[in-house]
Image: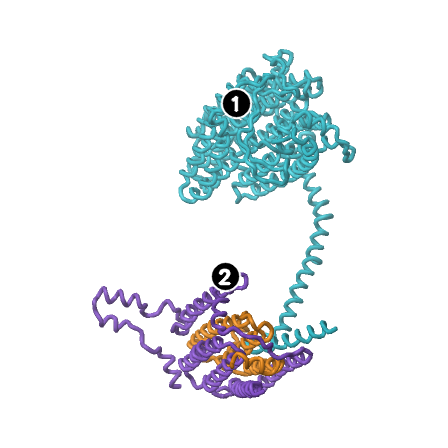
């Protein structure tokens, strides 16, 4: 009974924290605050994974999601800093439509769940570590292995990384990326050819592009 | 198959050379360097001609079959389209006496015409284009000649039609040339439809027979000539019960195929395109519309002769149409003023000769087959020479009208001599080529018992001599008529139209001289010994030798009378011709208007087909079909405008729709799966 | 101790109600946020709810296997890729348009 009480308390605690934080993710006026709240929601989900008996999954959730993705989001917000980015006021109509859509979704779900048989998790003796099982499943090439999807996901990550770099390269409106003033290799070539550091300094691009600076001031 | 020499097993090289040159000249050289384009095209055809002669030499030295005939070889056969076992189409080469003969004729005349054209078209804008299409024509004609099955023949048949179209319309800035090329294309296309239907009918039944023969037909395709002309296949085709409008199946197929041949060979009533085709450059007329392409119809009938022989009615059609065309065209030829048109009608007449020679042939009297092919052979040379001579004259005086020429004997001695030679040949004067072949044809008609046809042949022989010498006398004898006119009314012309007409350059008269030699020598080539109708049992009877005096004397006499008449009317006092024309009056006018055939066709197409059939269809198309299409577009645009408002371009609008869709889908799913 | 806790937690429907609520909140955020980054944050909520569901069904329906958990891992990985690309797009977009307000980004219509 004590175990059940502990489990229930933990569960409802996490649920409550999650929902509260999730609400602030979607409603907070300040984007940075929303990002931090999302961090909290994801952390709480890591707690849920733990509760479900997936310590490795919980670890991945914290490391990748909380530590990686959200930090990236925060970085991006900071890099494109502007007043507008930090504030957010949904319009009235937009707010209503969103409430309707979210509410309808939730309603339909509840309705569907109502008729569904429900049970507690079966009480079986679990393997000592989900880490080992996950590792075997991911790298197994057998009938129930996930080696191929695993490799595909790694390719997707690589493609996303390259795509992200290419897309986010600093370009000005109306200026193609290839016409940047100096290509790093060109700078190297100039250095070798002339042996002059001045030339390199002259031709190096400004650290921050002017329009972004203007926007920051404005 | 015995060991074949290189050229016999590589006969495909002969059409491949002009094809390669066509691609090279057409795609690469034409825009770059005109003289080079002409030189390459000419060289390629000369090479093909050399190979053909080599091939003919080797072929004639092959061991004969048991029956004494020259062998029939298919050294190359590549599968091209495979429909079914027994119904796949092969591309290949077929060597038998007539294909080898035609190979030599086509490449030789083509090579000489190519050479002649380098002079004739010197400095013209379309020089490269001209040689491109001339190469294309040579290639397709050779493919046609070598075709081992009906489909390859049909493909090349259309290709020669297309190249003929391009070359007739060579002067595409002249409306007359444009309409002539369209006319030629449409008329021959119309006839080719018959050919295609014939192939389909024949192919359908032949394939049925092929399927029923099993192993006996192994290695042969239903549309191969070798299969179609097998005696057992022919007897099965003959035994077919099918009837269409009271015509037997085999006869129907043969007549349909003949329709294609008649269109290409300009048989009555599909003859109307050939005189107009003279709008093309004269060397083209010499090569395509006299020596080679127009004989394709004759060749087709000869090639599938066993099929025709199996159907007496079809042969009857071939004979009657041929004889009639021959007479009909000769009549018109006596009245025309345009030198090339006279030659065109003479070609028509001679083609009719070849056709009726085939028509009188049978397995009992096979001479007509030989005679037809022999005449095809000799006619190619002297008719090409006549055209090249006419071209040389036109080149010198810049007109086609014989009444504006005259007295050219003095200015163009070489052309005059060669033209006279060819004219004598076509008139059937011994010992020139035309005499021998014409004699064979007349003999074939007489000995096979077709006396009426023999009479027509004799009459036509006389008329041929008459109208050919008519243009000869008017053109080369008498006084000069043209250049005086030029001096008086037009001083802006460039120099050489003021000056006296002069002899053509060597590059033009040398090919003519070669053709002249061939005109003299072709009659002595023992074609009748080589080209013979192989009887169904494969055993050739003793060859027919020598000249049949009972035929040769009347034939020659007819020619001499014709010449004499022409001399009487046109060489001396011009009043004689004029008064004769006046006496004939209305009759003469009708003939001169070519019996109003063009007008009849125009009436039929314009007033009947266009107004009564095409007009309503066009109205239906404009009002109903186009209306429906426009209505579709209009409704779509209206719909687009209406729906446009929902496309805000904002991602969240789309998101909202997406979510409503999801919710709706779940509800529907739930409602439909509820028990 | 942790190994047994899962069997003592509330029943499946309670869990699912929670994850649907999380998802519904994500939908609300996606449709109401004007800031593209905010939309992305809400999207992450939805993804996370999905990932939790995978683990959930794994534990409740076939506890001795880990296929659901593998799917959760993949969801996390794909989310990482998606965030990288999305953020790169926002940065580039900001460079061009000086805004990441999704209500003003209607170039598709124009």
* Chain letter of the orange region: C
Number of numbered discs visible in the structure rendering: 2
Residue B534, position as x, y percentages in the image? 63, 20
> Which tint was used for chain A?
purple
Q: Which residue is mark 2?
A: A141
Give A36 or A124, whichever is nearer the viewer: A124
Element type at mark 1: loop
Q: Is residue B63 left or right of residue B534?
A: left
Residue under the point 36% across and 68% down: A179
Q: Residues within 10 Å of mark 1 (few under 14, many from 20)?
A: few
The numbered dot on residue B2 is: 1
> Which tint was used for chain B?
cyan
For the C terminus of chain B, the quadrant is: bottom right
Badge 2 and badge 1 in a common chain: no
**Measured Cα–Cα span from mark 2 to mark 1:** 63 Å
From what the image shows, is residue C42 above or below residue B440? below
Q: Chain of mark 1?
A: B
């Amino acid at each position: 009974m004590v175990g059940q009480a502990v489990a229930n308390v933990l569960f409802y605690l996490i649920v409550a924290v999650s929902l509260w934080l999730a609400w602030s993710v979607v409603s907070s006026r300040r984007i940075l605050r929303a990002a931090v709240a999302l961090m909290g929601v994801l952390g709480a989900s890591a707690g849920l994974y733990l509760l479900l008996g997936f310590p490795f999954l919980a670890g991945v959730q914290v490391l990748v999601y909380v530590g990686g993705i959200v930090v990236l989001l925060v970085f991006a917000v900071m890099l494109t800093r502007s007043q507008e980015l930090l504030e957010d006021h949904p319009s009235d109509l937009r707010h209503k439509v969103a409430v309707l859509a979210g509410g309808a979704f939730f309603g339909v779900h509840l309705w569907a769940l109502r008729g569904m048989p429900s049970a507690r998790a079966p009480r079986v003796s679990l393997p000592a570590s989900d880490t080992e099982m996950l590792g075997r499943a991911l790298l197994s090439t057998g009938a129930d292995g996930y080696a191929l999807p695993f490799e595909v996901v790694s390719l997707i990550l690589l493609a996303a990384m390259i795509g992200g770099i290419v897309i986010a390269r600093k370009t000005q409106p109306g200026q193609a990326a290839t016409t940047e003033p100096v290509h790093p290799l060109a700078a190297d070539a100039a250095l070798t050819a002339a042996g002059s550091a001045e030339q390199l300094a002259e031709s190096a691009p400004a650290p921050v592009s002017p329009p972004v600076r203007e926007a920051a001031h404005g | 198959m015995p060991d074949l020499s290189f050229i016999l097993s590589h006969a495909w090289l002969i059409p491949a050379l002009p094809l390669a040159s066509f691609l090279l000249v057409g795609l690469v050289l034409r825009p770059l360097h005109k003289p080079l384009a002409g030189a390459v095209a000419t060289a390629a055809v000369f090479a093909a001609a050399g190979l053909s002669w080599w091939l003919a030499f080797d072929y004639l030295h092959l061991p004969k079959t048991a029956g004494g005939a020259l062998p029939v070889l298919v050294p190359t056969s590549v599968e091209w389209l495979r429909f079914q076992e027994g119904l796949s189409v092969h591309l290949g080469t077929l060597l038998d006496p007539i294909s080898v003969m035609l190979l030599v004729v086509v490449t030789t005349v083509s090579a000489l015409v190519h050479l002649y054209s380098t002079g004739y078209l010197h400095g013209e804008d379309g020089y490269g284009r001209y040689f491109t299409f001339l190469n294309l024509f040579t290639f397709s004609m050779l493919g046609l000649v070598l075709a081992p099955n009906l489909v390859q023949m049909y493909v090349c048949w259309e290709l020669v039609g297309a190249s003929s179209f391009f070359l007739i319309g060579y002067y595409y800035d002249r409306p007359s040339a444009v309409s002539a090329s369209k006319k030629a294309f449409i008329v021959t296309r119309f006839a080719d439809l018959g050919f295609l239907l014939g192939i389909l009918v024949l192919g359908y039944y032949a394939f049925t027979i092929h399927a029923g023969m099993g192993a006996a037909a192994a290695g042969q395709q239903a549309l191969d000539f070798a299969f179609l002309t097998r005696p057992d296949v022919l007897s099965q085709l003959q035994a077919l019960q099918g009837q269409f409008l009271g015509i037997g199946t085999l006869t129907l197929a043969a007549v349909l195929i003949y329709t294609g041949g008649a269109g290409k060979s300009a048989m009555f009533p599909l003859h109307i395109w050939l005189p107009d085709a003279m709008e093309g450059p004269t060397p083209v007329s010499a090569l395509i519309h006299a020596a080679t392409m127009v004989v394709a119809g004759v060749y087709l009938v000869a090639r599938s002769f066993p099929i025709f022989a199996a159907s007496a009615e079809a042969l009857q059609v071939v004979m009657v149409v041929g004889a009639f065309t021959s007479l009909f065209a000769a009549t018109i030829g006596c009245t025309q003023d345009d030198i090339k048109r006279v030659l065109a009608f003479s070609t028509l007449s001679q083609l009719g000769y070849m056709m009726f020679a085939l028509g009188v042939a049978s397995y009992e009297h096979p001479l007509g087959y030989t005679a037809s092919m022999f005449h095809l052979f000799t006619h190619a040379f002297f008719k090409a020479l006549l055209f090249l001579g006419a071209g040389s004259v036109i080149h010198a005086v810049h007109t086609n009208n014989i009444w504006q020429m005259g007295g050219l004997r003095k200015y163009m001695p070489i052309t005059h001599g060669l033209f006279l030679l060819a004219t004598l040949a076509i008139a059937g004067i011994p010992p020139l080529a035309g005499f021998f072949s014409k004699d064979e044809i007349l003999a074939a008609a007489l000995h096979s018992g077709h006396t009426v046809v023999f009479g027509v042949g004799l009459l036509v022989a006389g008329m041929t001599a008459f109208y050919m010498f008519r243009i000869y006398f008017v053109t080369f004898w008498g006084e000069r008529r043209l250049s005086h006119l030029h001096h008086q009314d037009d001083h802006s012309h460039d120099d050489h139209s003021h000056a006296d007409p002069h002899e053509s350059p060597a590059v033009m008269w040398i090919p003519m001289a070669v053709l002249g030699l061939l005109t003299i020598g072709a009659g002595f080539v023992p074609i009748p010994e080589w080209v013979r109708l192989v009887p169904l049992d494969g055993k050739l009877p003793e060859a027919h030798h020598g000249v049949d005096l009972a035929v040769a004397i009347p034939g020659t006499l007819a020619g001499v009378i014709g010449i004499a008449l022409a001399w009487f009317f046109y060489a001396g006092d011009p009043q004689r011709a004029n008064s004769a024309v006046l006496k004939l009056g209305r009759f003469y006018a009708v003939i001169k208007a070519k019996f109003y055939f063009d007008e009849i066709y125009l009436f039929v197409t314009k007033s009947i087909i266009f107004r009564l059939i095409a007009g309503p269809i066009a109205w239906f198309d404009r009002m109903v079909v186009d209306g429906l299409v426009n209505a579709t577009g209009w409704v779509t645009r209206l719909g687009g405008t209406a729906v446009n408002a929902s496309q805000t371009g904002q991602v969240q609008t789309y998101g909202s729709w997406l979510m409503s869709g999801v919710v709706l889908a779940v509800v529907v799913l739930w409602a439909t799966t509820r028990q | 101790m942790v190994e047994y806790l899962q069997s003592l937690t509330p029943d499946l429907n309670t869990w699912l109600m929670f994850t649907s609520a999380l998802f519904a909140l994500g939908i609300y955020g996606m449709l109401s946020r004007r800031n593209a980054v905010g939309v992305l944050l809400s999207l992450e909520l939805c993804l996370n709810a999905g990932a939790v569901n995978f683990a959930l069904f794994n534990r409740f329906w076939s506890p001795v296997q880990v296929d659901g958990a593998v799917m959760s891992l993949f969801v996390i990985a794909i989310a990482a890729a998606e965030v990288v690309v999305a953020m790169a797009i926002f940065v580039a977009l900001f460079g061009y348009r000086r805004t990441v307000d999704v209500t003003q980004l209607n170039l598709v219509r124009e």
